[in-house]
Image (tube, grey):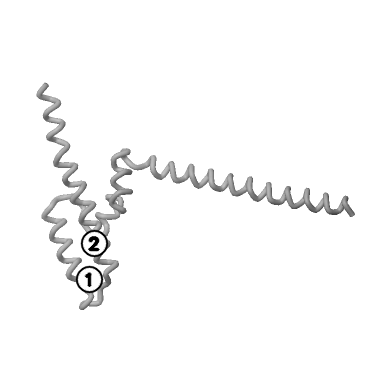
Amino acid sequence: MARFIAQIIITGTQVVARAFARAVRQEMQASQEAAQRLGNQKSRAERFDNLKLGLTLEEAKQILNVKDINSADIKTQYEFLFKQNEREKGGTFYIQSKIVRAKERLEHELTNVEAKPKTDSSKNDT
């Protein structure tokens, strides 16, 4: 009887160990894929901005339907889409919030682009 109990315990332990090993392998693979996706982004600063603002630059451009980042296009598209998605017109708060977040992301990028030449020109003067 003790022999059967020992076999059951050993078999159960083996099953749990195999399942754990498989889960670890899957997690490592998922981690590597995530690292590759993050590695495809341009810089550490861009990854930080994406996490902080909740959208990538490309997603924000798609949401507001702009190709280039300039304040006139961003403002025009934002106002149009925000008004079109008002609750009275059948829109939702979720879509409006996505539009607001996209505008914030593009404006953030716009301020970064505008600030960058100033720092570059000061380096060239020295």
Q: Name the residue type under label 1.
A: Asn
For the point 21% across and 78% down, which residue is it? 88
Residue 14 in percent (x, y) is at: 73, 48
Number of labels in the image equals: 2
Residue 17 in percent (x, y) is at: 68, 47
Q: Is residue 35 left or right of residue 47?
A: right
Classify the position of the C terminus by image quarter: top left
The reply to whether dot 2 and dot 1 touch (C-beta < 8 Å) is: yes
Q: Secondary structure at mark 2?
A: helix
Q: In this figure, which residue is indicated by the disc labeled 2?
A: 99
Q: Is residue 78 left or right of residue 31?
A: left
Give the number of the disc on residue 85: 1
Mark-to-mark CA distance, 2 and 1: 9 Å
- Residue found farthest to the right: 1
Q: Name the residue type under label 2.
A: Ile
Q: Secondary structure at mark 1?
A: loop
Q: In this orientation, which residue lies closer to the viewer: 3 or 58?
A: 3
Above or below, 71 against 98 in this view is: above
Residue 41 in percent (x, y) is at: 34, 42
For the point 17% across and 61% down, which residue is it? 77
Above or below, 74 against 126 in this view is: below
Q: Residues within 10 Å of mark 2 (few under 14, many from 20)?
A: many
Q: In this orientation, which residue lies closer to the viewer: 110 or 9?
A: 9
